[in-house]
C-alpha cells in the first residue's frame, strides 16, 4: 500500500514485526523493581503464569532472577523463582512493611556486669576441678573425693582437708598429713569411692 511502512499490515495496523517489538517491551523487567522488596505483589509472565506473594529477593544485574515468597496456611513457605525478563506485569497489593518505630527494651548494664562476673567466677571454680596433665584415674579420684570434701589440685597431687593424696592415689599408702584423724577420714572416703568406681566399671560392657 502506497505510503505505508514496510512493516505495516492492512489498514495501518501493526504488522507481525511491530507486534513482536511490543511484546519484547512488555516482557522487560519493570523499572525500580528493588522498590517492591518486601511488598506483596502479583506477577504475570509472558508464559501466562501468575505468582502472588512477597518479593523476597532479586538479582537483575547478575542471574536476572526474581524470588517470590508464598506463606501457606499450614505454616510452610514456598519460594517461586522466575527470570526477570519474562515478567510482563507486576501489581503491588501492599507496600513493604514499614520499619518498626518501637524503641529497644531497657537494658540494665549493671545487672549484666554483675551476672557476667558471677559466671566468670563460676567458670574459674569449675576449671580448678580439672587436673592438668593427670591421668583419667587421677581425675576419677578427684571427682569422687570432691563429692563430700573440698578438694583442689596441686600438680598431680590432690589436697583435701590439709592432707595430700599422691599418685597412684592408693588410700593405704598415698595419703600424707599431720592430722591422723583427718588422714583416716580421707582414707575411708577414698576407699569407699574407689570401691564404687571399681564396681561401676565391672558393670560396663567390655570392662
Image: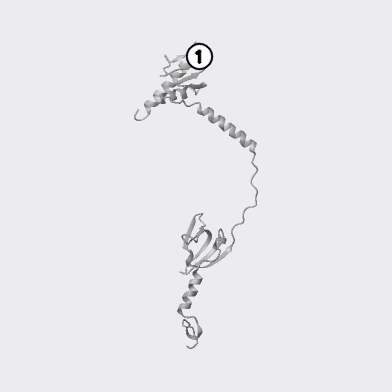
- Left or right: where does residue 38 sit relative to residue 207? right
Provide residue 3's location: percent of width, then percent of height: 50, 87
On screen, 60 above or below 125? below
Which residue occupies the extreme bottom position in the image? Answer: 2
Q: Is residue 68 visible?
A: no
Quadrant where the C terminus sits is top left
**Residue density around tag 1, few if under 14, some if 14–19, many if 20 or more, within 10 Å:** some
Q: How is the image coloured?
A: one colour
Q: Residue at x 49, y 64 (%)?
A: 84
Provide residue 156's location: percent of width, then percent of height: 45, 21
Looking at the rendered structure, the secondary structure element under dot 1 is helix
Residue 120 figure quarter: top right
On screen, 70 above or below 182? below
Front residue (pair 6, 18): 6
On screen, 175 above or below 65? above
Provide residue 142's location: percent of width, then percent of height: 46, 23
Residue under label 1, please give it. Answer: 182
Amino acid at each position: 500500500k502506497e505510503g505505508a511502512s514496510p512493516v505495516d499490515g492492512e489498514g495501518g495496523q501493526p504488522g507481525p514485526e511491530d507486534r513482536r517489538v511490543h511484546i519484547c517491551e512488555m516482557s522487560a523487567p519493570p523499572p525500580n523493581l528493588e522498590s517492591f522488596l518486601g511488598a506483596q505483589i502479583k506477577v504475570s509472565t509472558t508464559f501466562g503464569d501468575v505468582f502472588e506473594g512477597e518479593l523476597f529477593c532479586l538479582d537483575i544485574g547478575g542471574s536476572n532472577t526474581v524470588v517470590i515468597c508464598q506463606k501457606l496456611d499450614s505454616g510452610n513457605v514456598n519460594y517461586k523463582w522466575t527470570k526477570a525478563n519474562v515478567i510482563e506485569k507486576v501489581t503491588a497489593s501492599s507496600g513493604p512493611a514499614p520499619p518498626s518505630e518501637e524503641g529497644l527494651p531497657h537494658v540494665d548494664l549493671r545487672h549484666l556486669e554483675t551476672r557476667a562476673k558471677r559466671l566468670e567466677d563460676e567458670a574459674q571454680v569449675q576449671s580448678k576441678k580439672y587436673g592438668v596433665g593427670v591421668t583419667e584415674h587421677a581425675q576419677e579420684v578427684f571427682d569422687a573425693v570432691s563429692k563430700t570434701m573440698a578438694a583442689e589440685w596441686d600438680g598431680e597431687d590432690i589436697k583435701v582437708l590439709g592432707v595430700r593424696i599422691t599418685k597412684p592415689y592408693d588410700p593405704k599408702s598415698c595419703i600424707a598429713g599431720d592430722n591422723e584423724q583427718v588422714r583416716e577420714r580421707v582414707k575411708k572416703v577414698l576407699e569407699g569411692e574407689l570401691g564404687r568406681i571399681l564396681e561401676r566399671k565391672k558393670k560396663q560392657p567390655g570392662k
